[in-house]
Amino acid sequence: MFWLLKTRDLIKTNTFIKFCLIGVVNGIVGFSIILSLIYLLNINYIISSFLGYVGGIITSFILNKYVNFKSEGRIKIEFLIFIGSFVVAYSVNVIVLYSMVELLHQSKLVGLIVASITYTILFYLSSKFFVFIKHHQPIIA
């Protein structure tokens, strides 16, 4: 029982663990949107996929802003930086995946694992230190 309380306390205080758990929620929301649009509403899979990703990113942003990092910053600024951080982290993910598989001749599974870990750490660090910081100071006063 003690380990269960310790685990709960760790999850409550550790923003990286919460970030990862929010990623799971984000994935469930996004995938649910995609499947619902494709199979219930007969919407094109490309459009469905895009809308699923949009839903997942919005879910991730809201949960990270209010639950994980408890940010009081301006939502428009934080959202734009969050999207930029996602684009950078995802781009690095693709570069790492390609490099692992095509240049280093690793299996696709190994490439996916390394790329996913890289993406998660990079997106977490950018969220923590660039997106949800205490106060966003204007560049020009």
Image (cartoon, rainbow, N blue to C red):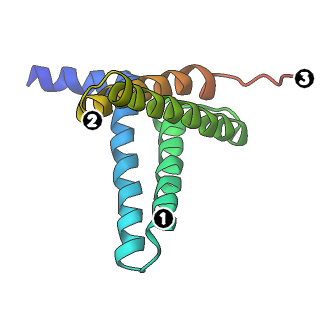
Judged by depth in the image, the label closer to the viewer, 3 or 2, is 2
- Whether residue 77 appears in this view of the structure is yes
- Give the amino acid type for the residue marked by disc 1 in the picture: Ile
- Of residues 103 and 41, the one nearer the viewer is 103
Along the polypeptide, which appears first: circle 3 or circle 2? 2
Residue found at x 31% / y 34%? 112
Under circle 1, the secondary element is helix
C-alpha separation, residue under disc 1 versus residue under disc 3: 40 Å
C-alpha separation, residue under disc 3 versus residue under disc 2: 46 Å
- Give the amino acid type for the residue marked by disc 3 in the picture: Ile
The quadrant of the picture occupied by the C terminus is top right
- Looking at the image, residue 90 sits to the left or right of residue 107; the answer is right
- Of residues 51 and 18, the one nearer the viewer is 51
The image shows residue 114 at horizontal and vertical percentages of 32, 25
C-alpha separation, residue under disc 1 versus residue under disc 2: 23 Å
Judged by depth in the image, the label closer to the viewer, 1 or 2, is 2
Crowd class of label 3 (few under 14; some 14 to 19; many from 20; radius 10 Å): few
Q: Dot 1 corresponds to which residue?
A: 46
- Can you say whether 22 is above or below 100 in the image? below
The image shows residue 113 at horizontal and vertical percentages of 29, 30
Q: Dot 3 corresponds to which residue?
A: 140
Residue found at x 37% / y 21%? 14
Q: Which of the labelled discs sits on residue 108, or is there none?
A: 2
